Every structure is written in structure tokens, then in C-alpha cells.
Amino acid sequence: MRLTIKDIILDSDPRIREVSEEVSFPLSKEDEALIQALYQYVCESTDEEKIENEGFKPAVGLAAIQVAQKKRMLAVVLRGEEDEIVEQYALINPKLISHSEQDSYLANGEGCLSVEEVHQGIVPRHARITIEAYDYLQKKDVRIRARGYTAIVLQHEMDHLDGTLFYDHIKENQGPETLHDPIVIE
């Protein structure tokens, strides 16, 4: 299975709002192909040649529901300044098990492959989170403690699994003063 930008559904498609279902183990061949394809898309999405020739849009994460698959799966690939991968996950059945009271948000707001329209405003997130999941890349159950940008990306992708989009968190006239000791991530 190979995903392209044509496989990604938009927020105008009601399926993006569906709640994804737990994935059973052992993984079926179809589920293995899907998690591999999600990871591959995110890895390749920043390749200039693929952007130009295949219309890829750069991404740091992708959830299965974004390709119309109602499964609790997501892939995240974060790159450093030299474009090297600094963190990567291919998570199945991720669960948020704890979070900080402190908030954080991206100074320039969030975006999404499934959302073409720009939505201005603060998207409040937990500054620190702990997730438990099965990581397909490591082939084992993992506990991930994340903060900063990584925590925001993971929360964004996990929201997709529950049918929530980033702009659902934006409230009119919500400024930093309405958040709990927020960390602003540039």
C-alpha cells in the first residue's frame, strides 16, 4: 500500500469526524500495510522531488482516519535542522495516560493535511503528556513522555482518532492569559 495526497480526506468529508476503533493483535496484513503506509507518507512528505512530482504536502504526522481508515493508528516523524529524523513513531492504540496542568501552544497556530482553510487562533495543548501505545517501529509496547512540540504533534494526531480537529480547540477572544501558565512554542 502506498499513500499519496489524493488518499487524504478533507474536513468537508464527514468520515474525518468518526471515532476510530481499537486495532486488535496480532496485526492483520492489512493493518501492517496501513501503519507502514502512514509512516512512509510522513517520511517522504518533505522530499522536494515528491512534493514537486507527486504533489505531496509536507507533514509531521498522519492518522489513519485521515485516509478514511477508522483505526487507532498514527505516524509522527520530527526532523532536526539538518533534516535528520530526531523522533519517529508509528503508534497503534495510543492512550493519553497523564498530562500536565500547564498549557502550551504553537505561536503560529496549527495546520493539518485534512484542513485546507487557515484557522487563526490559539490551539491550547498540554505542555507535557505521557502516552502508552504499541510502536510498530520498535515492535513493542512503549511509554512516551513528551513535551513541547512533540507533545503538541502527538495530541494533534491523537485528536484525529476521536474525530476532533485542531480548530475545534480555538475559542473566540482566547488569549494566552486564559491559559494555565502557557509555554509558547515558536
Image (cartoon, rainbow, N blue to C red):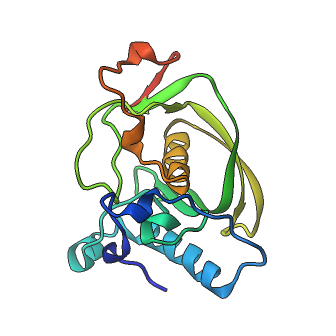
| Residue depicted at x 40% and y 40% | 168
Instruction: Tell me which corner region of the image, top left, top right, bottom left or bottom right, holds residue 129.
Output: top right
Q: Nearer the viewer, residue 75 or 72?
A: 72
Left or right of residue 185, residue 28 in this image = right
Left or right of residue 33, residue 78 in this image = left
Residue 15 in picture, x, y percent from top left: 43, 65
Give the position of the C terminus as an image quadrant. top left
Is 54 above or below relative to 20? below
| Residue depicted at x 44% and y 71% | 67
| Residue depicted at x 42% and y 60% | 16
Instruction: Tell me which corner region of the image, top left, top right, bottom left or bottom right, holds residue 45.
Output: bottom left
Residue lying farthest to the top in this orientation: 177
Left or right of residue 113, residue 161 in this image = right
Is 17 above or below relative to 108? below
Left or right of residue 72, residue 10 in this image = left
Instruction: Tell me which corner region of the image, top left, top right, bottom left or bottom right, holds residue 55.
Output: bottom left
Callout count: 0
Residue 24 in picture, x, y percent from top left: 74, 72
Residue 12 in picture, x, y percent from top left: 30, 60
Is 18 above or below relative to 182? below
Q: Nearer the viewer, residue 7 or 3?
A: 7
Residue 111 in picture, x, y percent from top left: 33, 48
Is 111 above or below relative to 4? above
| Residue depicted at x 25% and y 55% | 116
Q: Nearer the viewer, residue 34 or 173?
A: 173
